Amino acid sequence: MITRHLTLLIFFVGNIISAHAQVAIDPAIQVRFDSFIHYSNHEQWDKAFNLVYPKLFSQVPKAEMVQMMQDMGVGLDIQMTNTKITDTSLPIKEGDETFIRISYQSNLIMSIIKGGTYDAPKAIQAIGDQLKSTYGGRSVQWNADKKQYDITAVKNMMAIKGKDGVWYLVEINLDQPTLMESLFPPGIIDQLVKTE
């Protein structure tokens, strides 16, 4: 259960392509992105998930995800700082939707709450292993005195705009290919998801 929760947590918390270009980020995407980070840092999960690509909730109901994040808050405090978009792809239209790949970086601080759910050696080790698997061993530092992981995160996200003209966000996670295939059309998978 802890591993499933950690995988989903890291999925939300986290290349060059042929159609790649350095472009000015759409101000509407920037606002959504900044709002997502703000709501996540303040554990306002319902508001954060309102900004997430609705198709994701056909896989995991929104209420379940909100509850899962609230439950995690009993044992972990997660803060993202110095978060910024570093690059974007050109927009690609597929059907009624437009897709833009966003690269971003963030300093992620994950603190173990004393006496909480994860305040045990095995749980702390499991968290560290999951973080190193996701972000790379050199990007994850453990501070035993503070009981916190300091992570330099370089991640990718997809911004999707549908008929309503509103941009939604979802993390790109190549470790979950089945989930990616359920969210994105094959052409988007080839051009914007599998870029490594």
Image (cartoon, rainbow, N blue to C red):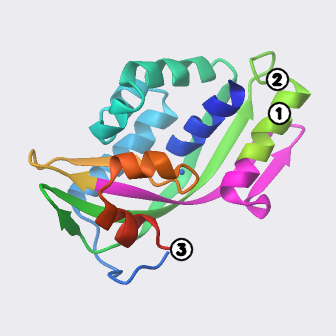
Q: Which mark is residue 89?
A: none
- Does the magenta segment cover residue 25? no
Which residue is at 14% across, 58% downward? 95
Give the residue pinned by disc 3: 196
**Range of magenta residues:** 131-159
Amino acid type of the residue tagged 2 in the rendering: Asp
Which residue is at 37% across, 46% downward? 182
The Cα–Cα distance between marks 3 and 2, rounded to whole angstroms, is 36 Å
Q: Residues within 10 Å of mark 2 (few under 14, many from 20)?
A: some
Above or below, comparing residue 36 to residue 88 in the picture = above
The Cα–Cα distance between marks 1 and 3, rounded to whole angstroms, is 30 Å
| Secondary structure at numbered mark 2 | loop
Give the residue pinned by disc 1: 124
Amino acid type of the residue tagged 3 in the rendering: Glu
Q: Position of residue 54 (x, y in %)?
A: 28, 37
For the question of whether residue 53 can be seen, the reply is yes
Amino acid type of the residue tagged 1 in the rendering: Ile
Q: Is residue 20 left or right of residue 139?
A: left
Q: Earlier in the sequence, mark 3 or mark 2?
A: 2
| Secondary structure at numbered mark 3 | loop
Quadrant assignment, res 139: bottom right
- Does the magenta segment cover residue 142? yes
Give the residue pinned by disc 2: 119
The Cα–Cα distance between marks 2 and 1, rounded to whole angstroms, is 7 Å
Q: Earlier in the sequence, mark 2 or mark 1?
A: 2
- Quarter of the image that includes the N terminus: top right
Quadrant assignment, res 5: top right
Q: Earlier in the sequence, mark 1 or mark 3?
A: 1
Q: Is residue 86 left or right of residue 166?
A: right
Which residue is at 75% across, 53% downward? 132
Marks 2,1: beta carbons within 8 A: yes
Of marks 3 and 2, the one in the foreground = 3
